[in-house]
Image (spheres, grey):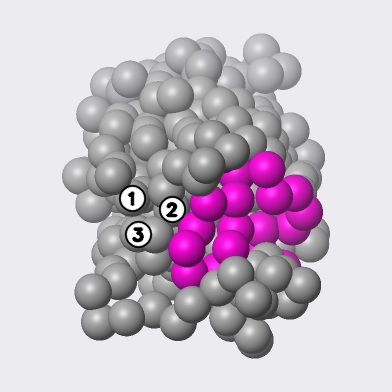
Amino acid sequence: MASTCPCCGYDALEASAAGAALCGICAWDERSRGDLAELQRSFARCGSSDPALAAFTRKPSALDVRPAWWLPLDDAPRHLIALLEEAFDGVGLDGGVSFDEAERIDDYALPARTELDPPPSGFGEGPPWLELTRFELDRYPTGNFAFQDARGLRFHLPAFLRAHLRDLDHPPAALPSLLCTLHTGHQLAALRALLTESQRRAVAHYLAFAAFTEDVAEEAFDALDVWGGDLDPEHFAHLRGVRRGC
């Protein structure tokens, strides 16, 4: 049975005579190496994952389909930003732990608290996450996420993910720490319970994309141990298969 090709996105990947999976449309095979985004660009330009393999390709027919979840890596940031903004629309700090409070908790100036505890005087208020600037996100390079409650994590999470998608070459300094929190953080269960289905799905789709970026690929892929179930099952299986071949 044919599966989705990581390069052209069509369900045209089948086992070849040599045993490796080979795409009958763009000639990508599972032994292919190199930047997947560049292989996708090659297909967009000339219909082949590699111009040298053009003789072994064919044009997609009306019977060839792409699954709804597949996107070229170059198109994903714009789509994911829109997905995050829609899913987390209107989310504020709502009494959660801010960076400033987390810093004080880390310094033992304030006690730690969970999403069930009210904020101390002067804390727990903030603008919608959309108003957070890159300067504010980079104020604390480690993020102090271990000292935030689920509300604080929900507030900062989409801002960090959007900042990365806006500038893939310069991710926020605390992003790797945040992604580790999405994998093993002690507030993980509370965070997932607090998020809506559409919010969890938006985070999972970001992680599926980030697993192919240079700076946080391993952290993102590790976090999918927790968030992969929020993806289409075929998408998650496809992602794991492609990552194994990287």
Residue 30 image position (x, y, % from top left): 60, 44
At 28% from the left and 69% from the top, the residue drawn is: 65
What's the residue type where badge 3 is placed?
Answer: Asp
How crowded pointer 1 is (Cα within 10 Å; few <14, some 14-19, many 20+) is rated as some
* Mark seen at residue 2: 1
Residue 238 image position (x, y, % from top left): 42, 42
Instruction: State if disc 2 and disc 1 touch (CB < 8 Å).
Output: yes
Region of the chain picked out in magenta, as a range: 20-38
Residue 220 to residue 77: above or below:
above
* Mark seen at residue 11: 3
Is residue 132 in view?
A: no
Sequence-earlier tag: 1 or 3: 1
| Element under disc 3 | strand
* Total numbered labels placed on residues in the image: 3
Q: Nearer the viewer, residue 2 or 67?
A: 2
Residue 188 to residue 57: above or below:
above
Residue 92: say if magenta.
no
In three-dimensional space, the C-alpha distance between marks 1 and 2, rounded to whole angstroms, equals 5 Å
What residue is disc 2 on? 13
Name the image quarter holding residue 79: bottom left
Is residue 197 in view?
A: yes
Instruction: State if disc 3 and disc 1 touch (CB < 8 Å).
Output: yes
Residue 146 to residue 7: above or below:
above
At 35% from the left and 59% from the top, the residue drawn is: 11
Does residue 230 appear to the left or right of 182 in the view shown? Answer: left
